[in-house]
Amino acid sequence: MSEPTSLPAGALPHGGAPAGPDLAALLRASARGDEVAFAQLYDATAARVHGLALRVVRDPAQAEEVTQEAFLDVWRTAARFDSDRGSALSWLLTVTHRKAVDRVRSAEASSRRDTSYHQQNQPIDHDSTAEAATASMEARRVRGALASLTPVQREAVELAYFGGYTHTEVATMLQLPVGTAKTRIRDGLIRLRDAMGVGQ
């Protein structure tokens, strides 16, 4: 399958169409090399992908680059999408979020390289090391707890807390009443709390 060297002709990060197409079907077709399906997927989701990238990197030019990187990654890895683990949109936004975070980390690393030798070589005290280890363990616990949620709960929680969307935005993206979206997020958080043993 040949890889497109750029995004579909005429497609702009701000030009996504309203939700409507079967995104999962478009992803599956893209995995088979269907460039028309990929262009339709792009048109249907580009605005949301660009919006998430912009929230994370906070720079329009960088956000456009992250958007293109995310869609090229989607083109290459569409076969990995598993509808049993969440919606196509949730999977797409997860790919985007990862690309955006990588871009932020890369920028931070570059900034650190520009600091003085003294600042770069400060010894890491014991408490910082312990905090890093604790954060890593917490991340594993959260991932394990997320796996205990139902697909619809996990999708809503990921959009709200990893995607940074409001309850109203989540409801719009999932084509649900706001009350239903709030219920899924609330129930998911309760289940997360129980799975992680918070408050016990």
Image (cartoon, rainbow, N blue to C red):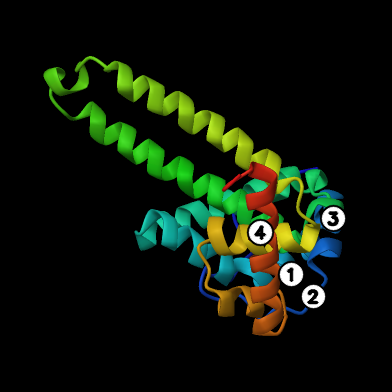
Q: Inspect this view and state whether residue 173 appears.
A: no
How busy is the neighbourhood of tag 3: few (under 14 within 10 Å), some, or many (20 plus)? few
How busy is the neighbourhood of tag 2: few (under 14 within 10 Å), some, or many (20 plus)? some
Q: Mark 4 and 2 residues: CB-CB less than 8 Å, in contact?
A: no
Residue carrying label 3: 83
- In terms of sequence position, does the residue under pointer 1 or pointer 2 come before the other? 2
Residue carrying label 4: 190
Left or right: 171 as drawn, with respect to 138: right
Q: Mark 1 and 4 residues: CB-CB less than 8 Å, in contact?
A: no
Real-space Cα separation, disc 2 to disc 3, in angstroms: 15 Å
Residue carrying label 1: 40
Query: Residue flagged by tag 4: what amino acid is it?
Result: Ile
Between disc 3 and disc 4, the foreground one is 4
Query: Residue flagged by tag 2: what amino acid is it?
Result: Pro
Real-space Cα separation, disc 4 to disc 2, in angstroms: 32 Å
Give coordinates of residue 167: x percent, y percent: 57, 75
Q: Residue at x 69, y 45 (%)?
A: 195
- Quadrant into which the N terminus falls: top right
Q: Mark 1 and 2 residues: CB-CB less than 8 Å, in contact?
A: yes
How busy is the neighbourhood of tag 4: few (under 14 within 10 Å), some, or many (20 plus)? some
Q: Residue at x 48, y 58 (%)?
A: 53
Left or right: 58 as drawn, with respect to 66: left
